[in-house]
Image (cartoon, grey):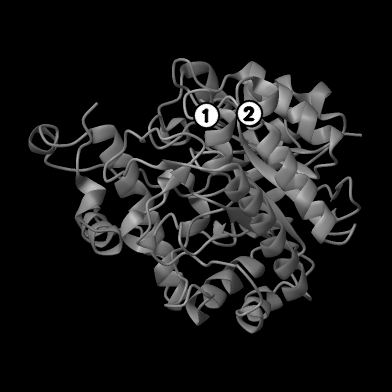
Amino acid sequence: MTTHLSSPLTLPGGQQLANRFMKSALSESLGDRDCGPSERLQRLYAWWARGGYGLVVTGNVMVDRRHRGEPGNVVIEDERHLAGLRAWASDFQDGGTPLWMQVNHPGRQANALVGRTRPVAPSAIQARVPGSVKPRALEDAEIRDIVERYATASAVAESAGFAGVQIHGAHGYLVTQFLSPLTNQRDDAWGGDAERRRRFVIEVLRAIRAATSPGFAVGIKLNSADFQRGGFTEDESREVVAALVAEGIDLIEISGGSYEAPAMMGTMRASTAAREAYFLEYAASVRDLAAGVPIAVTGGFRSSAAMESAVASGDCDVVGLGRPTCLLPDAPRAILHDGLATLPSSEVKAGLRPVLGKVANLKQLDGALDLSWHTDQLHRMGAGKEPDPRRTWGEAALWLGLRNGPGAFRAKRG
């Protein structure tokens, strides 16, 4: 039978998705002063709860308030915010759309000004991105503590009514730092070869499984590669896929790159552009390794024809939508019920390029502005307002600076 975007999907753990659309994680920066979920966050997710998705995944929820990726991150260390978390999940309880929480530790990508703590990482290697701080290498006991923090956050999420969690294993965050030989230069049980470098993510998955019920879903967002010479390769990524499948993962979302080499925001080659999705070719290459575990692909999809083709061909099982949902929160409903052929999109780039190019890496700046512009749209929806596609790059730059400080714009040497 041919699979369509409207086809239901049963995950290995038994959870049911009504269709093949997933709202992928977008960092909302809408936590309150105590790192709990705010009313604005709940109001934002009410838009997506009505959107007709098969699955909705939250933006990254941190597992340690000392180490946060950006201001406004929600953090779960215990049950102090349980009431607010239940309110966040409440709109999904009766609608039939599972809500998963993306759980994350930023590692060396932590914003030191937010946590007021020196970032930590597998090895003391600084990221080549604006505003970064050289991290401190983690001790063995600290690594084990972080593993348990993932488990605690997941158990609290289940108590709050979330249907699952997604481990963030992409885009240069801590899981990715353990996987890459560029950022993990340890020679102990957590590094030294590919098997030991992937131990961290396997232990995180095992700890989450031990702390939650059998019906609670666990997925991962995984890099196909980090696109840096000497870094995490597609062959190593395939080995991680095989290991995760053996441990009972429910869904693997494929992405790639980091904020040093942002493939998830980059330019497509012609063969990729024809199919729209950045990582579809890699996803197709791991079908046999996945052994029945569904594969989701996020990044680049804009036309319903390309989405339908990707699912019907079996190259992926789930279509992930990120930035388009900032402008059209009910994208699946618009495609499946209203016949929308192409999703709205906006690529934001800095102006004054001859001037800014002398003081900043324009590719990194464009990526930061694009993220900020889309974050602004999330904040509008959190305030109960419609998205504003006319918003300028200058407004995005202003709010990027206000949210993250002047370090967001500093060029990094080396």
| In the displayed structure image, the side of residue 100 where residue 345 appears, left or right | left
Viewer-closest of 239 and 362 = 239
Disc 1 crowd, CA 10 A, few/some/many (<14, 14-19, 20+): many
**Residue that mark 2 sits on:** 197
Name which residue lies at 36% across and 35% down: 127
**Residue that mark 1 sits on:** 184
| In the displayed structure image, the side of residue 166 where residue 356 appears, left or right | left
Question: Does residue 351 sit above or below 51 in this rendering?
Answer: above
Instruction: Describe the element under mark 2 as helix, strand or loop.
Output: helix
Residue 284 visible in rendering: no
Viewer-closest of 294 and 48 = 294
Which quadrant would residue 16 be assigned to in this image?
bottom right
Name which residue lies at 56% across and 76% down: 42
Q: Amino acid at mark 2?
A: Arg
- Tell me how far mark 2 sits from mark 1, CA to CA: 7 Å
Name which residue lies at 70% across and 63% down: 152
Name which residue lies at 40% across and 29% down: 261
Q: Are marks 2 and 1 in contact (CB under 8 Å)?
A: yes
Give x and y (percent) for residue 116.
35, 61
Q: Amino acid at mark 1?
A: Asn
Residue 206 visible in rendering: yes
Which quadrant would residue 192 be assigned to in this image?
top right
Give x and y (percent) for residue 363.
29, 33
Which quadrant would residue 412 be assigned to in this image?
top left
| In the displayed structure image, the side of residue 77 where residue 362 appears, left or right | left
Can you tell which mark lies on residue 148?
none
Question: Does residue 395 sit above or below 45 in this rendering?
Answer: above
Instruction: Describe the element under mark 1 as helix, strand or loop.
Output: loop
Viewer-closest of 157 and 329 = 157
Give x and y (percent) for residue 215.
89, 59
